[in-house]
């Protein structure tokens, strides 16, 4: 009989802890508190949606997890690793979707793919690089530069790069903003497929349709604070009797009704 203590002494990494644990996170820009005591967990294979209006603190939260910004206080643990103390080890477990300006503009897609696969330690031969591009519908674009692609093609390419090393946790900041409905659905399918392979995803969005379509669980934040947490169905069930939800729902309350009721109907920019 092996006790849990004995099991954890083997060479096998412990595979039952949270993929990500954020606790008591506080981030300030000067006098402004952008993230105020935010905490949540992501379990293996889970897709968590960080939702909130513009300026809620979503991107700032991701930038701390990615090691791009140091918080005032709080902790970030990736696969049991203290990401604030060991950012490089933590970062190796993350897939981060770069924006277009993050890539070398003079290289073709195939060259970028081979460059990044080398950086991630999963070198691809030319035929393998072609095959990978083929897999995301970019076989015709292998020789093109990123700026010659449509929005949907660029998103597919940056997602391919972010997942080259089969990351434990994929971080996506508004992955479908600016995409047409076809490209959006195709991205959702890719996200679903990644979950099917046991990957975990943290995505931000302000699309309720997206949250309902792909997220197992939602953390709703506003003004840097967590407003509520739960699965889309739980959030609707928990807030359906709220007079603010009742006041705006037409019939059955939707996730969007809950979102607007809890974050107010003021416009944000
Ligand atoms: N580099 C920055 N300098 C100063 N304030 C910032 C900076 N980045 C974001 N903010 C402010 O922090 C708050 C949270 O921003 P952000 O995390 O980008 O929100 P979201 O991604 O939810 O739209 C906003 O009030 C925003 O204006
Ligand atoms: Mg943002």
Image (cartoon, helix red, strand yellow):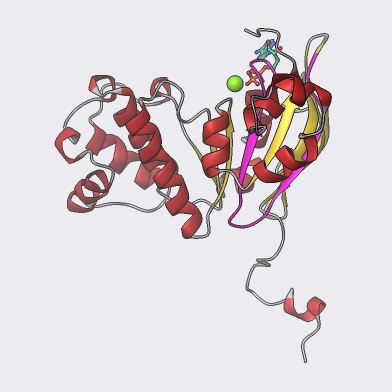
Q: Quadrant of the C terminus?
A: top right
Residue 47 part of the magenta-drawn span: yes
Residue lying farthest front? 251
**Residue 76 seen in the current view:** no
Residue at 52 percent across and 59 percent down: it is: 198
Residue 232 part of the magenta-drawn span: no
The residue nearer to you, when weighing 103 against 266, is: 266
Ligand 2 falls in which quarter? Answer: top right
Location of residue 150 by image quarter: top left
Residue at 74 percent across and 27 percent down: it is: 221
**Residue 197 seen in the current view:** yes
Report whether 56 appears left or right of 25: left
Q: Is 27 rendered above or below residue 166?
A: above
Q: Quadrant of the N terminus?
A: bottom right
Report whether 166 appears left or right of 238: left
The residue nearer to you, when weighing 60 against 259, is: 259
Q: Where is residue 210 drawn, in percent x and y? A: 52, 34
The residue nearer to you, when weighing 171 against 54, is: 54
Q: Is 194 rendered above or below residue 240?
A: below
Report whether 152 appears left or right of 45: left
Q: Where is residue 76 drawn, in percent x and y? A: 74, 41
What's the magenta region? 33-57
Q: Where is residue 153 drawn, in percent x and y? A: 29, 30
Residue at 64 percent across and 33 percent down: it is: 255
Q: Is 230 rendered above or below residue 151?
A: below
The residue nearer to you, when weighing 11 against 22, is: 22
Q: Is 45 rendered above or below residue 21?
A: below
């Amino acid at each position: 009989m092996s006790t849990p203590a004995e099991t954890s002494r083997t060479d096998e990494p412990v595979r039952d802890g949270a993929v990500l644990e954020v606790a008591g996170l506080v981030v300030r820009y000067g006098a402004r508190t952008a993230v105020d005591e935010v905490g949540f967990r992501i379990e293996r294979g889970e897709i968590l949606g960080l939702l909130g209006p513009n300026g809620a603190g979503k991107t700032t939260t991701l930038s701390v997890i990615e090691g791009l910004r140091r918080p005032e206080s709080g902790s970030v643990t990736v696969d049991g690793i203290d990401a604030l103390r060991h950012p490089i080890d933590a970062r190796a477990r993350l897939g981060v979707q770069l924006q277009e300006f993050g890539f070398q503009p003079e290289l073709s897609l195939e060259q970028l793919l081979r460059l990044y696969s080398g950086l991630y330690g999963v070198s691809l031969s030319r035929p393998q690089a072609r095959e990978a591009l083929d897999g995301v519908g970019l076989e015709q674009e292998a020789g093109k530069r990123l700026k010659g692609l449509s929005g949907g093609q660029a998103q597919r390419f940056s997602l391919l790069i972010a997942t080259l090393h089969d990351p434990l946790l994929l971080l996506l900041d508004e992955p479908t903003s600016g995409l047409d409905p076809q490209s959006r659905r195709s991205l959702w399918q890719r996200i679903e497929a990644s979950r099917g392979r046991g990957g975990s995803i943290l995505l931000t969005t302000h699309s309720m349709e997206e949250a309902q379509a792909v997220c197992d669980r939602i953390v709703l934040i506003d003004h840097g604070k967590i407003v509520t947490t739960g699965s889309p169905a739980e959030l609707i069930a928990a807030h359906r009797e709220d007079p603010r939800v009742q006041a705006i729902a037409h019939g059955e309350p939707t996730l969007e009704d809950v979102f607007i009721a809890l974050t107010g109907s003021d416009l944000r920019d």
